[in-house]
Image (cartoon, grey):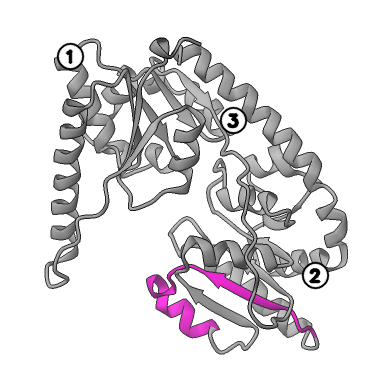
Amino acid sequence: MNKSNVKKILYISWTDFNWHAYLLANSIGAELIFIKRFRLNKILPKIVNVIIDYLYKSIKTIFLITKNKNDLFVFENPPPIGAVIGYFYKKIKMNFKYLIDAHNGAFEKPMISFPFIFKAFSNTEAVIVHNNPLREKLINKREFKDCKFFTLNDPIPNIPYYQYIGKTKDYLLVVTTFHGDEPIETVLGGIKVFLLNNPDSDLEFHVTGNYRKNLKVYEEYKIFDKIKFLGFVDQKEYHKELQHCLGVITYSVRDDVQQFATIEAIGAFKPFISNRNTTNLHLFDNKMILTNISPSEISEGIKKFLSEKENYKANIPLLRDNLTLKRKADLEKLISYLHI
């Protein structure tokens, strides 16, 4: 392609760093700018900090749009404010084009109730969602009749290898952020049932995420020697934990979400245990351990994983190939439609 015909794309993310945004921007040849959090004095109430942070990011977004003469802008949602700014800018400048990279939360309250967000969806070039079940649900809703939805699963990342200093026991890596859509209390309840039923097991469970978001759960389960709370870890430390674990445990209460932790596990050639939601069944049924969200089923899932982990590990190469081919085809559809 003639370089003069290559479109200039700018992806704007309202985060300090976002692995998903990095991978997507790289896929479509976009420049990526992170608008980092405006950090204020902790004395101020949290809501005041959030308002000032969002006001700062809104001003910065408008400045970037005005300054950069790009052919296409990409706004992450949530939060929905960037997309709404794009909509109003399009009202002023008719040839302004933008794309919305929408996560599940974008279609749930309170984000979907944000003023003018439906206008923003209706006036965008396209909306990217990250799994087919979510797309199928949205295209049948009247309020999205003017939207052009594209499915684009996250790419399988190459997880770098880092040496683990010192010896460690076998462990499963429990990937969580202690966010509201992750049933961490039920997951830890399942681990507790497994440990009580298997007192001679040396298996440990390393739990990621900022447990200070739920100190009640932390206080209840920190008494178990075989449950290690890692707290927030940086990307390098997380990849190290991922490379050296036996497998991954990741759960979400959402039915139509694409959990990035499952994709990262496949990237590290690690089998995983997750829940039987629509997306997981669509992608991983009979190839990974999927359970309902209950302590007893999670405990049984762990037991089954330990006895059959090599069989599930053997499924990973085919899963990698299938997911890579599917994403390549979906990405080609998107690029063809956008003429980029």
Distance from the alpha carbon under mark 3 to that under mark 1: 33 Å
- Whether the magenta-drawn stretch holds residue 203 is answered as yes
Residue nearest the observer in this picture, 113 or 337: 337
Residue nearest the observer in this picture, 44 or 75: 75
Q: What is the number of the mark on residue 93?
A: 1
> What is the three-letter code of the residue carrying label 2?
Lys
Q: What is the number of the mark on residue 132?
A: 3
Position of the C terminus, as image quadrant, is top left
- Whether the magenta-drawn stretch holds residue 248 is answered as no
Q: Helix, strand, or loop for circle 1?
A: loop
Query: If you read the primary sequence from the N terminus, does the residue marked by circle 3 or circle 2 appear first?
Result: 3
Tell me, yes or no, if residue 261 can be seen here. Answer: yes
Coordinates of residue 5 in the picture (x, y in percent): 41, 10
Distance from the alpha carbon under mark 1 to that under mark 2: 59 Å
The reply to whether discs 1 and 2 touch (Cβ–Cβ < 8 Å) is no
Coordinates of residue 240 in the picture (x, y in percent): 60, 66
Vertical placement of residue 240 versus 226, above or below: above
Range covered by the magenta-colored residues: 201-221
Relative horizontal placement of residue 108, taking residue 328 as reference (left or right)? left
> What is the three-letter code of the residue carrying label 3?
Asn
Q: Helix, strand, or loop for circle 2?
A: helix
Q: Callout 1: 10 Å neighbours few (<14), some, many (20+)?
A: few
Q: Callout 2: 10 Å neighbours few (<14), some, many (20+)?
A: some
The reply to whether discs 3 and 1 touch (Cβ–Cβ < 8 Å) is no
Distance from the alpha carbon under mark 3 to that under mark 2: 31 Å
Residue name at image x 48 percent, y 34 percent: 26
- Please identify, in this view, whether the residue under mark 1 or under mark 2 is nearer the observer: 1
> What is the three-letter code of the residue carrying label 1?
Lys
Residue placed under numbered mark 2 in the picture: 303
Query: If you read the primary sequence from the N terminus, does the residue marked by circle 1 or circle 2 appear first?
Result: 1
Residue name at image x 62 percent, y 56 percent: 160
